[in-house]
Image (cartoon, rainbow, N blue to C red):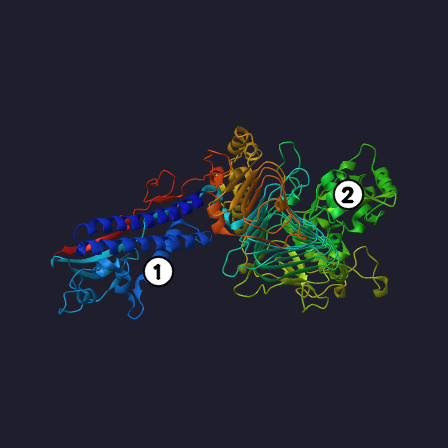
Amino acid sequence: MIIAMAMIGILATTLLWMSYMNYMIKVADVRNKNSFYSAEEVVEQIMAGLRQTSAEAVGVAYRDVMANWEDLATEDQRYSAFATTYMDTLIDLLKDSSMGSGYYNREKLKAYVDTDVFNGGPGDPEYVGVDVASWQNGAPAGESEMRPEMEMVNNNSIILKNIYVSYTDSENRVSIVQTDVCMDVPKLIFESGGSIDGLYEYTLIGNAGIDVTGGGTTTTEGSIYAGTNDTDGGGLNIYPANTLALDGSRRVISKGDIVVEGPAASLVVRDMPGEDNRVYARNITLHSGTVSLGSKTYVANDLSLNGPGSKATLSKEYYGYGVSTYNGLPGEPLSSEGKSLVDSASSSAIIINGKNSTLDMSGVNRLLLAGRSYIGQASTRTEADEIKAGTRVTGDPVMMGESIAVKGGQIAYLVPAECIGTRGDETVIGQNPINSEQVNDIEEMFAPGGAGNEGASGEGEQTFHEVDFNKKVYRLGDRALSEFGVTSMDHIRKVNVQYRGNTLRYYYLVMDETNAERYFVQYYNFNANKESIDRYINTYASGGILLGDFEAPDNQYTILGNSLVSSVLADSGVTLLTRVDQSTLNPSEGGEGGTPEEGGEETENPPVDPDAYTETGTNADEVDKDKQKDEAEVLGLSAGIANTYKALTFNLTEDASLVPTDPEVAKNYYVFNGVIKETDVEKYLDDNHKNTVKYETDSGLKAILTREPLNVSAVDDQTRLIISFDDVLVDKNFTGLIIAKGKITVNPASVVSIKQNKMDLYKVLEAKSEIEGDAITPIDMFVNGNGSMQNGAEAPTVDDAGNLIIDYGEIVRYMNWIKK
């Protein structure tokens, strides 16, 4: 790890410097015992002490930068923070509290000097030593006082002014040194550390996923990463009767899905006040589980509440950033195999399929839902497992107009029954779905060899339409399907379902996103339709679909589709959020003439009953377009988030430029080999004929490298780093970092906590191998594991051990030197 090496180098160099200075002082002491002391030796000891103090301040400042690395996003920000902390630390260590921060304490400088030197040793005449009066005065005794000023210059230097030493030796000779001392900020460049800048924020990195199973609650400090695998998909999976509480987790990243499998299963990501903590996932799926996210949340596809009693509580910011506008319609591009590009897995929505569920987004102040829900996705765990196993085959899904959808709402997208099977003006089938007998009836009504593939056969009044696109539909405000872009069988998707030994065929409408939104608003505006939809919502989302105040000036809600949400102002408790201008969807005037009771002729197209509709705007709230991002902005934002997610699931950085653009090349890269030198480490194990190697520091901290499955209960409590090429079972409390190429399984029945200890991790990276003569340390196994800080723009100066060397002799220097 680049940063670790630099950190260890600085700490080691600091200790070496302090030891070296103490040694030099002793040498000077012996040398001068055999000659004479002078004012110059006194000042040199002061300088040695100040350089030691500078080294202490460097350590404090560097640790501060490390602790806030993610928030300090750029090199400039990191150096600025380092310089500020360094200067503040120096001032705090040197200031005279009685005089204020603008003055240093001469007694602290005096403490750097050996007592026998400053005051004279045993047996020396009384006049030997430093003239205390002139020392305190900063000038010859009797002259005007020169105060111990401590001046900050350009935020990169501190000058200690008016150091005056008058020294009388045993021969009664007087030497005088008058000087200022300048203490500069070290010129360090904090470079990006390649693939593992944020490594020390992590406690669990499971390349094949993370499972939480066994029953109980585990609290985990630090960030976690859950990858994928070809067996069960991987991701982060929390099984029944388990709770994973993530505390101080700046990043929770799942390359696959986050699945909370109830009952009594929950995921809690606690808020980090003042921190930019985030959750990234492909999907978040609850099967009667609960999730509470006190973080920004980024989901590539859907948040799905599939099991009864599921509950999702979101706060801060939620970004469902997946955008897909393809629906298999004419004119859309096709794949290289000539197939439709319909991809419901790239369209972010929130879907509620489980009864008595709750979606609480009242704490969300930034909301983006860039996609729409689709009909044809798995709505239960069983269906999802069947699709994954290949035992359930689904056709192309059907795009709905909603970004927040509830099970049952798909009835709006069934072709109106009166449009199914018409001959002339007569409806001869009039059902949706239809059974197998009616399927046969429709096939028989097509003329042999006729235009049946187009959904119609015959001529004039005898023309048979499988779906009539021009028939006026009472429940759509007397509008025809063609008014919503449905003009051919290309806009119809047939879905066959087995039901009680029979086959039912459903006819669904296929529309682009604009027409789908318009269609749903028109459909929902009819009272009977609205009552049916609201009944489903109050059944499946009985706990409510709660939003924050989307009209508040500081909140921004961008929802590209329609959304049915809870409302205390609506009689049914439900309202529709939409971007559609409802004034364009008033019911049409209907047919001319009247009914027999009115003396007119009965028609197939009677006037629309205005009482069948509610007043425009009562059912729905139009979202203020001025407060939303437009679609171009959404596409740009979504692309940026997608690139960040791709990079994080590549090597835990947010730099997408490092990800190979060739898919064939990229598939050979994953987080484990983006962090660990996989090939080199395996060769190292082979060369040493080992499957497991242990490492230990002088203080007893341990690290383990293994290519075998490992149970944490089998390792020492002082183990701070585990690198495994296989699976790891966390079956006891652990402090440190676990990196597994396989899956990490946490058993809350025996694990109460998994904790961070960054300083111990820094130290254990330099632990010594148990193999005799082995110079490899854990840090050598990491990608980019050597050197990250540079002096100026040049390569860093290091000692034989690779430790970064800082020349404190240049940082702490004389100014205005006068010797008499």
Q: In the orientation shown, which residue stands out farthest toward the front? A: 123
How far separated are the C-alphas under marks 2 and 1? 70 Å
Q: Residue at x 68, y 38 (%)?
A: 231
In which quadrant is the C terminus drawn? bottom left
The disc at residue 88 is: 1
Q: Nearer the viewer, residue 438 or 284?
A: 284
Percent from the top left, x then y, of residue 475? 76, 57
Q: Nearer the viewer, residue 92 or 74?
A: 92
Percent from the top left, x then y, of residue 753? 60, 54
Question: Looking at numbered disc 1 in the image, what kind of residue is underneath it?
Answer: Asp
Label 2 with label 1: CB-CB less than 8 Å = no
Q: Is residue 148 above or below residue 636?
A: below
Question: Looking at numbered disc 2 in the image, what kind of residue is underneath it?
Answer: Val
Q: Nearer the viewer, residue 244 or 665?
A: 244
**Mark 2 lies on residue:** 495
> Left or right: 150 with respect to 734?
left
Regarding residue 273, the answer to whether it shows in the image is yes
Which dot, 2 or 1, sits closer to the camera? 1
Q: Residue at x 59, y 51 (%)?
A: 370
> Left or right: 13 with respect to 734?
left
> Left or right: 297 with respect to 231?
left
Regarding residue 588, the answer to whether it shows in the image is no
Percent from the top left, x then y, of residue 93? 33, 61
The disc at residue 809 is: none
Q: Is residue 358 above or below residue 427?
A: below
User: How would you rate the neighbour count of disc 2 (Cα within 10 Å): few for under 14, some for 14-19, many for 20 or more?
Assistant: some
